[in-house]
């Protein structure tokens, strides 16, 4: 499948948190990670009520809300993952829009997210493909737009300067254990850079 909305990846199929104390709500022990739009996942199990999926992402394994995942055929998944042209998000966070005028907000992407590039969508933006969840849970593709200033066609060169520039874009970003609060923890910080 492909993730269609920013979602939590949990140790157990429930939204309630597990905290060491009532006053420290910064470390939910059930929170593994958060997944961005277009993250590929392998679905291994469905909860009895059908509301949760046990999935393996490129970095973690755990439970996801089923409403955040579009189930794809292998052909769709392969064409998406092995697209010849891609854009990679280089901003700390980038907004994703459904229209060329950048008025219809679809969601947010974090640094390092990659999307298939359709074309330069006009002045200052790229047109990309994103997965959508159909009512039956299947996968459909749609066009979306990301601002040029927030992305780069292909990967940045792996140089010390590029690494430092990317790291400093996350300066003063709040800490978020396992992606809580839409932020990143120390390991996600390194992965994003």
Image: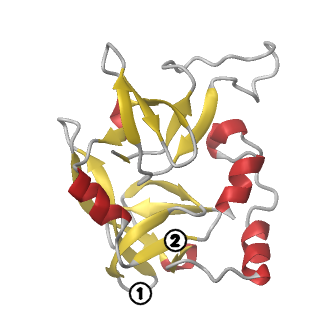
Residue at 64% over, 41% down: 179
Packing grade of label 2 (10 A; few <14, some 14-19, many >=20) is many
- Quadrant location of the C terminus? bottom right
Q: Position of residue 31 (x, y in %)?
A: 63, 29
Q: Nearer the viewer, residue 138 or 83?
A: 83
Whether pointer 1 and pointer 2 mark residues with C-beta atoms closer than 8 Å, the reply is no
Name the residue that disc number 1 marks.
Answer: 123
> Is 122 situated above or below 175?
below
Packing grade of label 1 (10 A; few <14, some 14-19, many >=20) is few
Q: Is residue 8 left or right of residue 107?
A: right
At numbered mark 2, what does the secondary structure look like: helix, strand or loop? strand
> Is 162 situated above or below 29?
below
Quarter location, residue 120: bottom left
At numbered mark 1, what does the secondary structure look like: helix, strand or loop? loop
Q: Nearer the viewer, residue 128 or 112?
A: 112
Q: Is residue 190 left or right of residue 147?
A: right
In the rendered image, the residue lying farthest to the bottom is 123
Q: Position of residue 144 (x, y in %)?
A: 34, 65
Name the residue that disc number 2 marks.
Answer: 88
Q: Is residue 97 visible?
A: yes
Residue at 36% over, 18% down: 47
Q: Is residue 179 left or right of residue 52?
A: right
Disc 1 or 2, which lies upstream in sequence?
Answer: 2
Q: Is residue 8 left or right of residue 50?
A: right
- Quadrant location of the N terminus? top left
> Is 144 situated above or below 188?
below
Residue at 30% over, 20% down: 50
Residue at 36% over, 78% down: 84
Q: Which of labels 1 and 2 is toward the front?
A: 2
């Amino acid at each position: 499948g492909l993730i269609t909305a920013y979602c939590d990846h949990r140790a157990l199929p429930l939204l309630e948190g597990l905290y060491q104390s009532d006053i420290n709500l910064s470390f939910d022990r059930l929170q593994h990670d958060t997944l961005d739009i277009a993250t590929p996942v392998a679905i291994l199990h469905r909860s009895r009520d059908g509301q949760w999926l046990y999935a393996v992402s490129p970095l973690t394994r755990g439970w996801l809300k089923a409403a955040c995942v579009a189930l794809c055929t292998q052909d769709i998944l392969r064409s998406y993952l092995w697209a010849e042209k891609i854009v990679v998000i280089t901003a700390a966070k980038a907004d994703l829009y459904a229209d060329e005028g950048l008025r219809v907000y679809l969601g947010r992407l974090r640094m390092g997210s990659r999307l298939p590039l359709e074309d330069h969508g006009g002045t200052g933006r790229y047109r990309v493909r994103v997965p959508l969840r159909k009512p039956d849970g299947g996968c459909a593709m749609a066009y979306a737009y990301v601002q040029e200033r927030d992305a780069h066609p292909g990967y940045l060169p792996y140089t010390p300067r590029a690494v430092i520039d990317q790291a400093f874009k996350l300066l003063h970003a709040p800490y978020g254990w396992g992606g809580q609060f839409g932020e990143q923890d120390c390991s996600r910080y390194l992965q994003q850079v």
